[in-house]
Image (cartoon, rainbow, N blue to C red):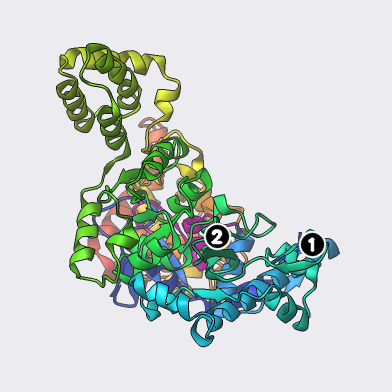
Amino acid sequence: MARFAQDSIERVKDAASIVEVVSEHTELRRSGARYVGLCPFHDERTPSFSVDPAAGLYYCFGCGAGGDVIKFVEEREGLSFADAVEALAERFGVELEREQEDPRVEGARRRRARLLELLDRTAQFYAAYLWDSREARHAREYLRERGLGEEVLRAFGVGYAPSAWDTVLVRAQRAGYSVEEMAAAGLVKRGRQGGYYDHFRARITFPIRDARGRMQGFGGRTLSPDNPAKYVNSPENELFHKGRILYGIERARPAIAKRGRAIVVEGYTDVLAAHQAGFEETVAVMGTAITPEQVRELSRYTEDVILALDADRAGRDAMLRAQHVASGKRVRLRVARMPAGEDPADLLAGARPGAVAAERFGAALDEAVDLPAFHVRTLLEEAELSTAAGRDRALDEVAPVLAAMPESIVREELVREVADKLDADPVLVSRRVAAAERGGGAGRQASGSADTGGSPEERPARASAPLSEQERREQALLAMCIAAPAFGRDYLERLRPELLSGDLVRRARDWLLEHLEEPLSGLSRDDEELLSLLTRLAMLAEREPASPEAMEDTYLRLELAALEREIEARAGEAPVELQRKRTELIERLARGPAAHRAPSG
């Protein structure tokens, strides 16, 4: 597989604003030359996350996550190294060069680029047609009646497909695209007599993009009451996979990360109305069934997902099915009940931030309940509770849902709620729940919360173990060597292996001896441990006092610690020379920094 030329990668890192990228995932505030904020990789209340814009680095002193802007995009958005580089290059306008690409791989990449370009050109044409053509007048009126303003419609690129059979077909051919490319992009389809015609005709069009903003396909809504297909999407193809995409994710992603939650609605106009009302963390599943791929996509940006689907039976069933697709994912699913007979677009029609309708929607979100609680209450609402047999069947249905929940006050409250609704003894309900727990199986799969036994990429980051005094001193000295290389190189040469506590810090010392001026340049990304430690050291270099006196003091304490370890290992039979040297070191440290001998620089 082709690799990016190293100078291309360096240009990406130079062009990409690490503060801008990180700010999409956590709020940063300036602190001197750096920015600090809450870590987006683990839960914390006190900021321990630091970004150095000059060095282009981030580091969390709580969990140890760190690296450059490419590493951040890899880790936070779940992308491969190549995809992260491409995403940043596209965003910051850097042209990438590749080394020795396989002709077949290059051909596939060029084809994909052409299809994406074709879709983007078509989206621009549809958008212009909506606003400029007489034919789209009724579409503009419909959207206005739905309470959707021009600003949000233009922001999302909403358009209109002409009613003619071949408008896009002819335009794309004139622009140099083949019919095969148009079919592959889902823009035309073959007729019964062998010819091709436009896939979207006389429909309002909604461009569907991936999280990086690349066109994938379209959704189209007819305005004709005689057309049985109210909505149609692009056909499944090499670019468009409905079950993997969330409508609006490219615009919602920064708000999701900042607000710490995602709102999931059903359709295109629901998303537009929500964004217009100030709920910019909203995306749509373009139907009623959320998929594991969509849950996985959301889990890259947040652990709190609120389902605000339609209040009808289909929407409710979709929320119940979501329990199964969320199993093992690092997300907490909650449900916001919509008023009967209203979807979010109806509720928010014409609403702006602060409007009454927006406040009603916000209140519904604030009152969202965990999915298992919603499931239990829905089952009870639908159960036949007027007979003992009906109540028994209801208990059989709710017990596995309760069993799937972790032991908690919430679960205990639900047990009491179920007992009250069924007019049953809470002890009986608890016994049935315990029996369902022992049975495991499907009931265990029904939880909408996280399963901490998931795969490594799905498990939440854990805070790193606290450093020992020895490790703090080692890292402080290495960081000072980076901060003051004129003195630092001398100390690196004096740092014998026995003064350091482990192989990793010794490898860091060896690396710095050869790369002190640019400690992260040329480092293999495969060596995660060394990359993380050197990133930490580079960030510490901004904070550590790098005076010769401080470096000498830290070095002498490492010498003393190593000497004491050697004396202890000899079980009290250490030579007089070691004891004398120990006394000298203690006396030098007691005299303070002024007495320390700094090495020549």
The residue indicated by pointer 1 is 105
Vertical order, 430 against 168 (above or below): above
Taking the spot 70% from the left edge, 70% from the top edge, the residue there is: 113
Q: Is residue 375 magenta?
A: no
Taking the spot 21% from the left edge, 33% from the top edge, the residue there is: 410
Please give left or right for residue 281 compared with residue 69 in the image: left
- Dot 1 or dot 2: first in sequence order is 1
Please give left or right for residue 367 compared with residue 249 in the image: left
Q: Secondary structure at mark 2?
A: loop
Vertical order, 127 against 506 (above or below): below
Taking the spot 77% from the left edge, 63% from the top edge, the residue there is: 108
The residue indicated by pointer 2 is 227
Identity, as a three-letter code, of the amino acid under mark 2: Asn
Tally the marks.
2
What is the crowding at mark 2: few (fewer than 14 residues within 10 Å), some, or many (at least 20)?
few
Res 450 → quadrant: top left
Q: Position of residue 565 (x, y in %)?
A: 39, 40
Q: Position of residue 154 (x, y in %)?
A: 45, 79
Q: Are marks 1 and 2 in contact (CB under 8 Å)?
A: no
Is residue 523 at least partly visible in the picture?
no
Taking the spot 17% from the left edge, 17% from the top edge, the residue there is: 426
